Image (cartoon, rainbow, N blue to C red):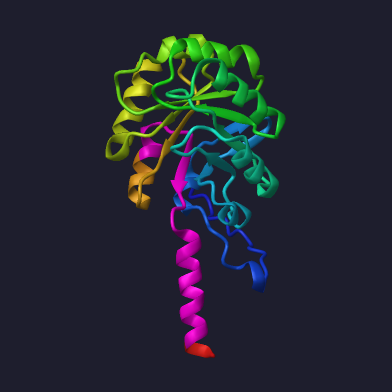
Amino acid sequence: MDRPIKTVPNLTSELRKDIVESPTVIRNASGIRLFGKRIKSIVYTTDVAVIANSDADAILAVYPWTPNTRILDAVSRVANVPILAGIGGGITKGLRSATVGRFAEENGAQAVVLNAPTSIVTIASVERIVDVPIIYTVVNKSVDLKERIDAGVDAFNVAGGKDTAELVRWMRNTLKDSHPNFPIIASGGKTSDQIAETIAAGANAITYTAYGISEQTLHEKMDHYRETH
């Protein structure tokens, strides 16, 4: 017997109808429960205007500079969903990463994210200081997954570019005996088909980028104003 397709009523307003919407296909992911909240869609941005106008389940606040507590403070002021806060791990490492992690936790971050070059020593330092989950970013197959889990990593964030789905499949196969249900977050790609493939490969939650959304929305509104006024 076919299950009926559920229609989800949508409530919005004239002033808030242009929110940044997550790709619909992400709803097919299983999700990850973070302190009781089920997370499937994660928007990757530090643009506070996007954060304040997004329907994502969580925010991935990671950027290519050394972690700055003022940036996290700005994000936390406007976010009404969990924040996964980047705390370095490459150039910013060891006790400094752990200290930034503690600040992030104290200011509302519900998980901290370490980047790909993070050493086992830094992971252990963060594990000793923070209470929130530690997420480690995986970019290729050279990483020892079990070693990082043993050091304190609670979830993986996969950022493999065009090879993300294949990398997720490799991780699931590697962990199938020791950690079959280990949480995996992954970048979904630019199309619904790419996101669907990543979910099928074993990703529990999907990140999507919001680069240029503020500028694009502003340009569209200005074009509309020019045509109608």
Judge by depth and name the residue closer to the eye, 155 or 218.
218
Tell me: residue 115, above or below residue 217: above
Relative to 80, 89 lies left or right: left
Tell me: residue 78, above or below residue 176: below
Judge by depth and name the residue closer to the eye, 4 or 11.
11
Residue 51 included in the magenta stretch of the image: no
Task: Give x and y (percent) for residue 156.
Answer: 46, 26
Q: Residue at horizontal 29%, vertical 18%?
A: 142
Judge by depth and name the residue closer to the eye, 33 or 103.
103
Task: Tell me the quadrant of the picture where the C terminus can be found.
Answer: bottom right
Prevalent SS, magenta region: helix
Tell me: residue 141, above or below residue 107: above
Judge by depth and name the residue closer to the eye, 127 or 155.
127
Residue 201 included in the magenta stretch of the image: yes
Q: Residue at horizontal 52%, vertical 83%?
A: 225
Task: Give x and y (percent) for residue 158.
Answer: 40, 31
Q: Which residues are magenta?
A: 198-226
Q: Residue at horizontal 45%, vertical 46%?
A: 208
Task: Give x and y (percent) for residue 103.
Answer: 66, 28
